[in-house]
Amino acid sequence: MKEREFQSSAQETGLRGSRTLHVLALLLVGGVFFFLNLSGTSLVDNEETRFALQARQMVETGDWLVPRWSGRPLGTKPPLFHWAIGLLSLASGEVSEWTARIPSAAAALATLFLVYALGSILFGRKTGFLSALVLSTTFIFFQHARMARSDMLLTFFITLSVYLFVAGSLRAGSKARLGYLLGAYGAAALATLAKGPVGIVLAVFGGLAFLAAKRKWGAFPIWGHLLGVAFFAAVAAPWYVLYAQAVGREYVEGLLIHENLTRYVNAFNHPQPIYYYLEHFSTNLLPWSLLGLPALVYAWKRRRESGNGFLLLWWAAIFIFFSLSTSKRDHYILPLYPAAALLTGAFLGTELLVGQGIGWRRMARLIFQGMMVALVVGSVALALVAWYMDRELFQAALILGAIALVTGLLALWVVRRGEYGWGIGISLVGLLLLQVAGQWKATPIIEARRSPAPSAVALAQVVGDRPILAFHFTKASIDLYGGEERKGKVFYAQRFSEVVSFLDEYPEDGYVLMKANRYPGFWEELKKRLRVVQPSLSYGKFQMILLENIPPTLGPDPDAQGN
């Protein structure tokens, strides 16, 4: 089936421009949203600092095979994201906020172009462009584009796999199709190296959704899929094999079973009810939340037209898969937002800008006007809340509120004249200005409040170059921001036996750091080996106690007694 059979029948208007103009516009939008002042805030515990610290250890030790935590293998994530940080850091000379976040920002920008390409195939170039703009401004996507986490890399490779699968299905030549199919399996393998087996699972969901919606089960021969599986194994399997040889099979089993299957069926952290994502999907779709449900219903009503059925199945497969998991966090469903953006872009492009049905057109336009009214009301509320609750942020809130107010009023004025394409354009410019102003005025205040770096520096000034063990306080910033003399001298422990081993290894100069409220319940025999150096030491929002090693004889280990 040729590509034009997938194009929307709607004659799109608004957002006119050539492919070159679209590409330049997306580069500008992605550059401002994802890269502007990317290093303006310190890496946050432990969402970002652990990845950066592990990458730094790879660079310094030359061991690129085993991600390590406190000198030990940490079998929770495969190493692709660490490799990306490490390679960038080799080029720049150090692991920094910039090098740690660039992989996510670059992956986000590349995902925009994949959504543009997918939307162009399924609906037409203008709707593809609109979908990419929706994705770039979606809260959760923007947030993770600027974070040193592997989730955006995972999202990019899953989207790439789905795109190659769809594009390959539209190619007439069998040789070209095979190349696309192998590329799709290769992208799924890289997704697996970014975050584990979930990479291949989510990529397969996208491929199956396309085959089911378009009934193109024969698009690729069976032997082509078998070759693709072999290619997937050739890309993804070597690291797992070498990792098992280096650290032992139990670590690989922990990575594959404990961190994935066990977490899925019996959450050992972040347990949430099955309806958790019903609320959080919409919240994280801001500022397009009001369009989320109508876009899904619209796609269902037109599921046999264009790409609506495929996108709806793709979105639903990921949504249901993670809803059934017992462990849930907002960013787990990040890979479904490209599909959500395409659904929203198709709804807007077909109904807001053109209008194929009077009821749907009226709904789309009322919702868009409601969004602009909410922007105006929110701009005033932002300034008032800052005035009463946070005077330090008031000036920033005033500037941001003024931009939002002008944007909302201008957009309302033009859409009341029927110029919805201009309304979207004005909204986008307003969001870009909000990002620039926010990085200029709000980011320095946020950095001063939440940065773990000052606490790490203050702690380093107390302990100097002596080794320190953090007990039940796994903040990687202690090591990452503790200075050159701290490198390799910060350890982390969860068990009393690990504290004993540390004190035995450093009998003269070891320090132990823990939360102050944990100290009363600390093992009494261990207290005899430690004296308090700092009874009240702040580390961010935590009150800590710092102790110094003075070795006596120990009694029985409570860990051995099951405590």
Image (cartoon, grey):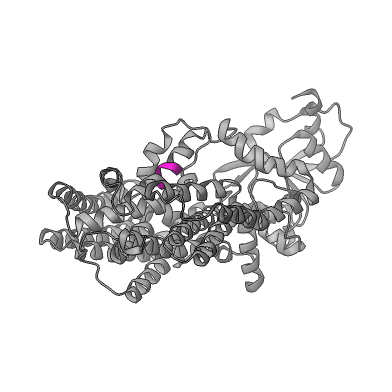
Q: Residue shown at 44%/38% (left/top)? A: 320
Quadrant of the image occupied by residue 551: top right
Q: Residue lying farthest top?
A: 561
Q: Residue 200 magenta-drawn?
A: no
In screen coordinates, is 119 left or right of 445?
Answer: left
Instruction: Decide: is 266 above or below 100.
Output: above
Point out the stretch of residues depicted in magenta: 314-318
Residue 549 image point, x, y percent: 81, 42
Q: Residue 316 magenta-drawn?
A: yes
Which secondary structure type mostly characterizes the magenta part of the structure?
helix
Residue 170 image point, x, y percent: 41, 61
Q: Residue shown at 39%/52% (left/top)? A: 339
Q: Residue shown at 39%/45% (left/top)? A: 313
Residue 78 image point, x, y percent: 65, 52
Figure label count = 0
Quarter of the image that includes the C terminus: top right
Quarter of the image that includes the N terminus: bottom left
Out of 269 and 224, give the one closest to the viewer: 224
